[in-house]
Structure formats: structure tokens, C-alpha cells
Amino acid sequence: MPDTSFFPRGAGLTVGEIAGLTGAELGAGTEPGIRLTGIGALDLAGRDDLSFFDNPRYAGQLAATRAGCVLVASKYLPLLPEGLPHLVAANVPAAFAVVGREFYPAARTPSAVLPSLGISPRAEVDPTAEIEDDVTIEAFAVVGPGARIGRGTIVSPGAVIAGGCAIGRDCRIGAQVVLSNALLGNRVILHPGVKIGQDGFGYVPGRAGLDKVVQIGRVVIQDDVEIGANAAIDRGAIRDTVIGEGTKIDNQVQIGHNVAVGRHSVIVSQVGISGSSTVGDGVMIGGQAGITGHVTIGDGAQLAALSGVATDVPKGARWGGIPARPVREWLREVRFLTELAKKGRSPRNERND
Amino acid sequence: MPDTSFFPRGAGLTVGEIAGLTGAELGAGTEPGIRLTGIGALDLAGRDDLSFFDNPRYAGQLAATRAGCVLVASKYLPLLPEGLPHLVAANVPAAFAVVGREFYPAARTPSAVLPSLGISPRAEVDPTAEIEDDVTIEAFAVVGPGARIGRGTIVSPGAVIAGGCAIGRDCRIGAQVVLSNALLGNRVILHPGVKIGQDGFGYVPGRAGLDKVVQIGRVVIQDDVEIGANAAIDRGAIRDTVIGEGTKIDNQVQIGHNVAVGRHSVIVSQVGISGSSTVGDGVMIGGQAGITGHVTIGDGAQLAALSGVATDVPKGARWGGIPARPVREWLREVRFLTELAKKGRSPRNERND
Amino acid sequence: MPDTSFFPRGAGLTVGEIAGLTGAELGAGTEPGIRLTGIGALDLAGRDDLSFFDNPRYAGQLAATRAGCVLVASKYLPLLPEGLPHLVAANVPAAFAVVGREFYPAARTPSAVLPSLGISPRAEVDPTAEIEDDVTIEAFAVVGPGARIGRGTIVSPGAVIAGGCAIGRDCRIGAQVVLSNALLGNRVILHPGVKIGQDGFGYVPGRAGLDKVVQIGRVVIQDDVEIGANAAIDRGAIRDTVIGEGTKIDNQVQIGHNVAVGRHSVIVSQVGISGSSTVGDGVMIGGQAGITGHVTIGDGAQLAALSGVATDVPKGARWGGIPARPVREWLREVRFLTELAKKGRSPRNERND
């Protein structure tokens, strides 16, 4: 396999070292001294790559793989072609992820666009901003008065940090991010084009049209949050919009004013969360789901992609559909209607009508 | 309450002055001389803050509030804790909004990112652009040939105003807005990342693939329109895309070529309106709704969040569902199916099958 | 009609020349020497404009049009007002598109924002970047180390091309596009705000929260692809994300890691395609549709707007609904439920319950 990745390989690890690192067990007949330097999909991996097998759908690729070693769950051992070096792991994706981070440290967090570190002479940084050491601010970025930026943070080209914002340490502020009325913790990653802290959407009917409801809250983003490209998070009206520690938010998500999202939740692409709703800890929200305002999604709840949540969702519940209800009920109704409509067309049924 | 807002308080108003300003009536036993300087939610407001109560869901917070005064509708007076200063208003949200705008004038419209007004030496402004007095163009903004910008307008960092565009007075052009082939009225607010005037999406099958249909129309945005972060409005193909006076558009909305939106309509986040459709005056479109091309949404219609509109919608109608139909019918069908599916599982019913 | 387009007219063509160019036939009594210089909608076109009629909905406009000539299908000839010059075309939209491209060559592709070509002194271009002749890089654009940009390409203000990216010839990189880990073919158009090549969305549960799965793949965009404003395409995890030749993608579309889209497909606004799914050639995906991960959409399939695809879709199939199924079944079920719910309310039925 020609190496086409933008991320360079290092010295790698031996299969034995990988076993130690991940807790996986060396497969029968697998030589611990094999050295691997990269990771790859079954159909693309070469002799220097670790691959993984976790989905029977790809059994054909497993049979034909040229990977140097494969991570596999014990239940799939019978599918392994003879002689293929392998490691047996209880949690294959987790073990594979550990190795990936080890092999490609540069891929753990976004890097600066330009090679020169420090503050670019072509950035516009207000003299009252407080910038710690070891901060990189790239060309054409703007930092407003009184903004604070912590050590190890990179502000990419064209990003705008408005006055008074605080950014913690080791953050990555992507190109063309706009940040206002916001406080960020440490190790926060904002991908390109994220817009945080603009006005929430609030109006009341007035004499000559719609009058604005002022939005005087902030956006508070806790440690280790990651937010995807072109997502938008509005500042609160009269409280803060809050994204809890470790929560991961995908591209183009929209989060309205006053929303509070808990810790370690996952919000997939194009989800919209309306104003003043609360999302608990460990919640998973599928792509394009929409949540109405002033509702609560309990801890650990899971919402199916494209669902439309109009009411509170209990802790740990799995909901889907529009309007959202327990997934099991929703899918049963879908199937039920399908069956019914089929029968509805039968001659017998038509006679009964 | 520690004051955490990015918006400074001023001298404030007395409760008596607030009554005069909003038309609210002084509550029984409420001292008109109490001076307030801020607004806050019931659970966060302190002695210097005006709060409001408008939703019985928050009765617990009302009982415990430490706000200096509360705006309340007369029907909720029995829920007020004894001794809490209050103002009785016919329309509580509207009165609260009036006070908010009075207390926080800086929150009425987005402000410049950097403190220096005028045209930044680090902006790129074509010499043929016509810029009125009292315009601010911040660092790294670009203004193309022949563009016109009216008095009092602020163009934020990184915004791009392409050649020939006209922007009225007192507009706010957010960071990283891109504007081409567009005419804007006065007091238009474009939040960060809005993209206006790019090609509409039009192709015809050609010999070697899809051939572009040229898009030679414009985008016309009338007075007092506000458009949310990362929204996109395409220019027309052979007519203009038009957004009517006073219409408010939320983040990430997509509006296709030739669409005409009327006056004082409200379009919530992530809505998509396909090409050549017409939206009337005073229409409300819920989040994530989608409207197909070449249909008409009548004046005053309301479309539920996540609805999918495939046909014309009559004036004043309330529609929802996919495909959209009158909300009442849609919800009745949803409930009907739920009931039916429940019965469908019962042993008796299964025997009948 | 006052000429309000941002695109100037040229010398135009005679009706006879248009017939030759498009293969249309000169209508009865139509003078081949009439010279036209622009295109317009029936209700807006003037004596110098070509218009077209293709939808009986606009018969009223046809009757009243002041266009200099109208393209029309033979089946609609009876609707033509007497004396209106016309051309009869087998494929009216295609013929109209040909003329539009001929009349307005400047509208075929986006142009530079500023008049000066070449590399702006206010762009930041790494000295190791390889820029061919006849490339325009506008103010405040950034080009990283080792990036390559082909002849005839325009990089607009504020665009960021990260290190190692390759862009082919005659491409248009819109304002505030961010490109990383990506290879682009020739004649690719990226509208403003497109974000390509950021991290895919991958995490595994770890000890202290969610751990990142490194994303070491690329984004490969083939010739003649066009991508709409504020769209986002993530780079692959352990393979590439690929957009095939000639495919057209509308505004705000989201494409996840490892997705492969085929050739000459059309993806309408706000669609989301989840990781590792495959979309064939000539596929049409309606607005706001969502596709789950690891599924395959067969060549030539058509997905209705707002559909939610949870399984593979066969070649040439037309699917819709949530979860998606054949459009005919889906719509039949919708109608069936509507009928059933109506009956369900009837007194007779209630007695039977």
C-alpha cells in the first residue's frame, strides 16, 4: 500500500508491545516481534499495518487482507485465515483506537496551518488581551480587548476571538471560528467555521414588527469538548448556554440559547437543540434529530437519528420518530402500518370496507 | 448574583419608571422607588434585577426567587410569595423585553470586535467602493469594486463584500460573512458566517455530465431583517431571491434561488426552503422544516418543526408532518396509529387476523 | 425591464443563431434575425430577452409575456399567444441553459472578489507551496507548506489551504473555505464557507470519557465537482472520503468520514451522509435526507427529500420516508393512515371498538 496519509509514521511498535499497551492477547502462532508502524482498513492495510475485524459484513476482506496483524474478538477467531498474525481483544475498537493514537500522535489534535509558532505579525491582537506563553495565533486571526488565551492553545487563520472571551490551555481554535461572549475550558477543540456566542433567537411582537429580546448570557464550554465544523452555539438570554465536560459535538449542529448539555454526551451532525432545553450526561443524539425548547433529555438517553423530540425523555430511554417516543413503539408502529397498508390493498379487505 | 454578563449595567430604572415604560401596573405593596439595573431568570436574579414569571412550570423558582421585582400576569398573582415586589403586565414577555433593551443597549445589536472605529488599515477596500461616513470596516475585511456601504454600518473581521453589493445604513455584517450579488436595506443584521448571493443550485443533464444553469439574479434583503450564523441564501436564477422587511431567520437556515419570503416572518434554525417557493407575511416556520420548490406558504401560516411541505399551504393554516398536512389531522393520525398498533398486538386482535 | 443583474450582457445572438446552437426549431412566423442579449423569466423578460415555458402553471405569464422570444415544447404550442416569436425545443430547460451560459459567460464560474489577479501581497503563502502560473490568491488567504495549486485556479479572500493539499486547474476556492488533508481535481468549485478535511467524528469510551479515534485518511474530490456554501466533508478515518467526478453538492450538506460518493450524483441542501456509506453514480438525494453509516445507495437511486435511509437502497430505486422504503409504499401508507384515521373517528367505528 502506498502511504498516502497526511500523517507521517514513526518507529511504531512490535505486536508484543501492542499487546501490552492495549491488554490484547497475542494470538496463537503470532510472533510478538513483528514491528508495525501504521493502521489501515482490512482491504487497504499492508505488511506494516495493524488492522481490525469487528463486523462480520467484512469477512471477505478479512480473508483477503494483507495486514501485518489484525485485532479481533475471540468470537470471530474461526473466521481468521490461517497464518494471519492477530491479537485478541475484548474491545476491538477501543484497542485499535489506542494504537492509532500511539502511531499518529499528530492526528490527536488539529495542528497549526503555518509552520511558524507564536503570534503572527499578521494577526490583529488587541494590546489588552492576555496571552500566555506558548500560544500560537496565526495570520489574519483577531483577538479583541481583554480576551485571555491559555498556554499551548493554537488560534488558526481568520479566527475571531471577541473581547472578554477566555480560552483555556491546549485548545485548538480552528480557522474562521468566531467566538464571542464565551468562556472555554482546557483542551477544547473547535473545528473550522464554528460560531459561538452570537445572539440567541428571541423576539416579541412589537408595534412595527418583531422586537429583539436582548441576549445577555454567555456560552460556557467545559474541558475536553470538541465541536465540529460550521456548528453554531448561541449565547444565553438570561442564563448561560453550557456544554459539559468531554461532550463531543459533530459538524453543523445548532444549539440554541440557554441550553445546558451535560458531560460526555455525543451529538451527531446536523442536530438542532432549541432554546432552554436540558440534555443530561452520557446522552447520545443521532444525526439530524431535533429537540424542541424547554424539555429535558435524561442522563444516558439515546435519541435516534432524525427523531423529533417534543417532550421530556426519561433517563436511559431510547426514543425515536416524529414526534419521538420509545424506539420500540415507534418501529412497531411503522411495521404495523406497513402490514396494514399491504392488507388494505387486498381484494378481500376491500370488500369488507 | 455575581455579575457575569458581557454586557455592562447602567444606571437602571426605578420600578415606577419601569411601570411607565412598559404600561405595567405597580403591584400591591410594591415600592415605586426600588431601583433595578439588570434582568435575570427567577433562579439567578438578585436584588438589583427584574425577573418575570410566565410559565407555571417555574412556580417553584418564583417561590424562592431573590429578584428585586418580578413582572407577572394578573392570573398568576395567587402564586406570588408574600412581600415580593411585582409589576402586573398584560403581556409579560413583551414588557420584559422592553426593559431588557433599555437596561442593555449594547445588546440590541452586535458591536464591532475591535475598539477602533473607521476603516482599518488592515482591511482591503477597493478604491472604487463608496463608503459613507461613520462606517467601520474591521481588520481583514474585504470590500470589492463599486460596493456601497451606508452610514453607521459595521463590517466585522474577515467579512467579504463583493463588487457591486449595496448595504444600507446601520447594518451589522458579522465576521466571515460573504456577500455577493446582493442588495441590503437598513438595519440588517447578518450574524457570523452567513453566506449570501452565491450560485443557486441548478443543473441540466449534458453530454459529459451535469451542465450549470447560470444564476444571474440577485439577493434583495429588506430593512430590519436578521439572519443567523452560517445561514445561506442563494441568488436567484432569472429573478431575485427576496427576504421581506422585518423577517427574522435563525442559524443555519438554507434558502434557495428565486425564493421570496414576505415581511415579519420567522424562520427557525436549520429550515430549508427550496428554489422558487414563496413564503408569505407573518409566517412562522419551525426548526428543521423543509419546503419543496415552487410552492406557496400563505400569509400567517405556521409550519411545525421538522415538517416536510410538499404542496401549497393556505393562509393562516397550521400544518405539520411529512408530508405536511393540517397539524390537527397529522397529530390525530399519529395518535390513531399508536392506539391501533397497541391493539394490534393484543391476543384477541391477533386471533381475528 | 431595467437590467438589474450583476452579470453584464454581451452582443448576444440572433434567434436563428440560438436555433443553431441549441438544436431548437424556429417557430412558425418567427423572424430569425431578432437579436437577443439576455434571459429572463416570463413575467420579467423584455424585448431583448429569451424566456422559456415549460410548466402549465405559468400559462398566465406566457399569455402576458413581453419576452423577445420564448423557448417552448411542441406540446405547449397551443398555449402560445399569437405573434409571440418562439423556438421549439425537445428539451426546453437544457436549451435555455445553453443560451444562458452563452449570454453570461461570467456567470459560469465564480469570479475573484478583487480586480487584481495574481498573488496578493496580503495573502500568506508559505514559500514551499507550489503555485503554477496564472493562479490568483486574494487578500487574507493562507496557503500552507507544500500545498500545490494548478493553473487558472482562484483562491478567494480568507480561504485556508493547509499544508500538503493539492488543488487542480481552473478551480474556484470560495471565500473562507478551509481545506486540509485534501486533494482536488480540476474545475472543482467550492462555494464560500465550505470546510473540507477536518477530523471525522470518531470516539471510543475510555477511562476518563470519550477517547478520539485518529482520522488519518484524506478527502479526494474529483474533477468538475461543485460544493455549496457552508457544506462540510470530513476526512477519512482509515480510508479516504471520496467525491466522484461531476457530482454536485448543495449548501450545508454534511458528509462523514470514509464516505464514497460516485460520479454525476446530485445531493441537495442539508443532506447528511454518515460515515462509511457509499453512494453510487447518478444518484439523486433530496434536501434534508439523512443516510445512516455503512450502507450503500445503488447507482441511479433517488431518495426523497427528508427521507431517513437506514438500509441499503437498490440501484435505480426511488425511496422515501423515515425509515426509507420504496416511495410508492411509503406514500401509500401515508394515504392509508389518513383514510383510516378519518374512518376511525366515525361513530360507527367507535361503536365497534
Image (cartoon, coloured by chain):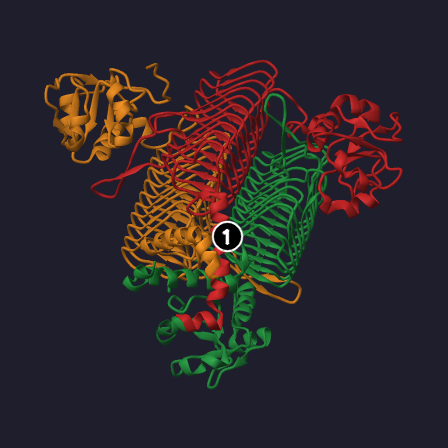
Chain colours: A green, B red, C orange
Residue at figure coordinates x 50%, y 59% from the top left: B338
Which percent across, then down, holds residue B90?
Answer: 72, 29
Asked whether residue A8 appears in the rendered view, the answer is no
Q: Quadrant of residue B137?
A: top right
Specify whether C227 is left or right of B318.
left
Viewer-proximal residue, A173 or B317? B317
Q: Is residue C298 left or right of residue B85?
A: left
Q: How many marks?
A: 1
Between C199 and B297, which is closer to the camera in this rendering?
B297
Q: State the residue at coordinates (59%, 13%).
A: B133
User: Which residue extends farthest bottom?
Assistant: A29
Residue B239 appears at what percent x and percent y?
A: 36, 25
Picture layout, residue C286 above or below residue A21: above
- Amino acid bearing label 1: Ile
Residue B310 in the image: state x and y as whole percent. 39, 41
Question: Badge 1 sits on which subunit?
Answer: A
**Residue C26: x %, y % from top left:** 12, 25
Indicate left or right for C60 with B14 as reference.
left
**Residue marked by disc 1:** A322
Q: Which type of secondary structure does the marked residue at label 1 adopt?
A: loop
Q: Where does the C terminus of chain B fall, quadrant-wise? A: bottom left
Regarding residue C33, the answer to whether it shows in the image is: yes
A119 on left or right of B335: right
